[in-house]
């Protein structure tokens, strides 16, 4: 007897438990991909496994839906493999230790992989039913797509041969909130601006006093979820501080600027090492700026702190031209929300976040993450950054570009799913867009007239060893999915 064998729907939990017995962290999907292929082969279903281990399984329609246009069901087979420090499981080779709590399934000491094992289990349960010879689930012809490596750049979806798919309607099963219909997501691109500098002879510092300027205590946050909340960016604030320094003392020197460590996180701390002949006046100016910034960000960043700490420096300073280019980059390249969505309330359409600022041996590297739910807007912002970088003599490069999934004003699928939810539960679902990426963007880019919605059961603390999948929600979303398929 399995740990989950008494749960309903039985087929879903059966396959979920089997999935959890197979190691399937991102980059380690060969075994689970082969498991899905063996399932298709055993059930007599047409399938393909591509060179990166994506799998597509085709199933005929049932009941009165046999002649319907095909519908794509899609989810990813990889999970984020994390564990507690004292957990003895080897996540490369061992299965998970499933546990049942009150209305929850979790894994002892590790992530559960409900994201997105539940999608794999849903699809396998439907495919098992259709292959039984006496199907009880009514649905159109199905193209079930199981992708790899979603959690580490969506490289599986980007490698998938979309010409194998005939469907134009897709239900993605990679959401974590029951009662929400996800209908749009942002695309993104990593953006690196490099400002080269020259260091000068130490006699430049004669008569100057060096100090470290520290901005700390900011709220920070995820640049996809919190960028529109008006929170301060420590690196951007540092640009404003350094501009004030040069206004006070045009002979002031810059040694280094550093802040943040991830491009998708709003930095909460930033440091700069400077030298000035007016340290007392600069310290007073920083104190005044702290008061002004505290007022500007009183609601979003109540913990803001700013300090000027005298220090010794063991490298030569940058020359004035380099200093001015760095300050110009920090103050002229835009940051934050550039445009809000005209279609969905409170949704940023286009934004960028200066997430990492690092001083290397010969250059200052400014790393931004550009996001947009409209690819044309993302491209326009890239072009703007390129133009600004060119004007100030900085280099630039872009990497990891992935497409957005634009909101579709007329969506037959969304209308059906919305009304189905109302009919089943007596309340309206939340139609949602997010300012982050999901695989639907890859499909939308490749498939003409693409119509999709993403759904899923309630999960909490995904990507952590505290991850929980809710049992009753999993059952309700299963029942909802089957009703939607019967109405298409």
Image (cartoon, rainbow, N blue to C red):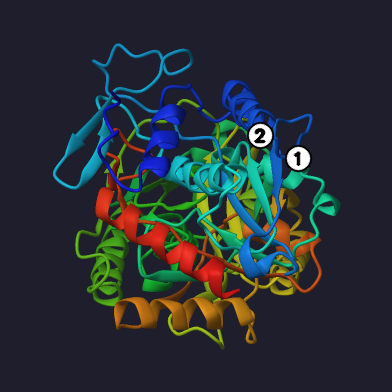
Residue under label 1: 46
For label 1, the crowd category at 10 Å Cα-Cα, with few meaning under 14, some 14 to 19 and many 20 or more, is some
| Proximity of marks 2 and 1: CB atoms separated by less than 8 Å | yes
Position in image of residue 458 (x %, y %):
32, 56
Q: Residue furthest front?
A: 134
Position in image of residue 315 (x %, y %):
52, 28
Position in image of residue 350 (x %, y %):
59, 72
- Residue at x 68% of width, y 38% of height: 198
Query: What element does badge 1 sit on?
Result: loop
Residue under label 2: 40
Q: Is residue 296 left or right of residue 172?
A: left
Pick the front one: 93 or 48: 48
Is residue 138 depicted above or below 292 in this figure?
A: above
Pick the front one: 63 or 250: 63
* Separation (CA) of disc 2 from disc 1: 7 Å
- Residue at x 31% of width, y 83% of height: 427
């Amino acid at each position: 007897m399995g740990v989950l064998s008494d749960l309903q729907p039985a087929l879903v939990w059966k396959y979920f438990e089997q999935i959890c017995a197979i190691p399937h962290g991102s980059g380690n999907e060969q075994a689970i991909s082969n498991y899905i292929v063996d399932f298709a082969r055993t059930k007599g279903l047409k399938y393909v496994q591509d060179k990166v281990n994506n799998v597509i399984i085709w199933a005929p329609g049932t009941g009165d839906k046999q002649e319907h246009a095909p519908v794509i069901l899609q989810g990813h087979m990889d999970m984020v493999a994390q564990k507690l420090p004292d957990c003895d499981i080897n996540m490369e080779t061992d299965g998970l230790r499933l546990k049942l709590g009150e209305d929850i399934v979790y894994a002892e000491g590790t992530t559960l992989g409900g994201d997105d094992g539940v999608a794999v289990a849903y699809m396998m349960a439907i495919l098992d039913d259709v292959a039984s010879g006496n199907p009880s689930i009514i649905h159109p012809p199905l193209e079930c797509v199981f992708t790899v490596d979603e959690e580490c750049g969506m490289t599986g979806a980007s490698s998938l041969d979309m010409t194998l798919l005939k469907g134009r309607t897709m239900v993605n099963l990679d959401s974590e909130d029951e009662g929400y219909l996800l209908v749009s997501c942002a695309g993104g691109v990593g953006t690196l601006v490099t400002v080269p500098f020259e260091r000068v002879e130490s006699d430049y510092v004669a008569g100057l006093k060096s100090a470290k300027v520290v901005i700390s205590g900011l709220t920070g946050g995820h640049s996809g979820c919190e960028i529109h909340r008006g929170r301060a960016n420590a690196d951007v604030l540092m640009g404003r501080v350094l501009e004030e320094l040069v206004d006070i003392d045009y002979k002031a020197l810059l040694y280094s600027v550093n802040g943040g460590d991830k491009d998708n996180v709003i930095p909460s701390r930033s440091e700069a090492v400077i030298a000035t002949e007016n340290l007392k006046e600069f310290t007073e100016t920083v104190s005044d700026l702290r008061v002004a910034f505290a007022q500007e960000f009183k609601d979003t960043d109540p913990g803001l702190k700013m300090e000027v700490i005298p220090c010794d420096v063991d490298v030569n300073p940058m020359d004035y031209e380099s200093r001015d280019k760095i300050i110009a980059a920090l103050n002229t390249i835009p940051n934050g929300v550039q445009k809000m969505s005209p279609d969905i309330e409170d949704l940023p359409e286009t934004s960028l976040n200066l997430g990492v600022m690092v001083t290397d041996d010969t250059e200052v590297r400014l790393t931004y993450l550009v996001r947009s739910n409209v690819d044309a807007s993302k491209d326009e912002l890239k072009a703007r950054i390129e133009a600004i970088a060119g004007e100030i003599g900085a280099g630039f490069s872009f990497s990891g570009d992935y497409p957005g999934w634009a909101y579709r004003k007329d969506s037959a699928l969304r209308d059906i799913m919305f009304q189905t939810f109302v009919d089943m539960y007596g309340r309206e679902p939340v139609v949602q867009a997010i300012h982050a990426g999901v695989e639907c963007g890859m499909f939308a880019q490749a498939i003409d007239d693409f119509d999709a919605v993403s759904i899923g059961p309630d999960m909490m603390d995904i990507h952590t060893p505290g991850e929980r999948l809710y049992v009753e929600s999993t059952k309700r979303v299963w029942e909802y999915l089957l009703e939607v398929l019967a109405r298409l």
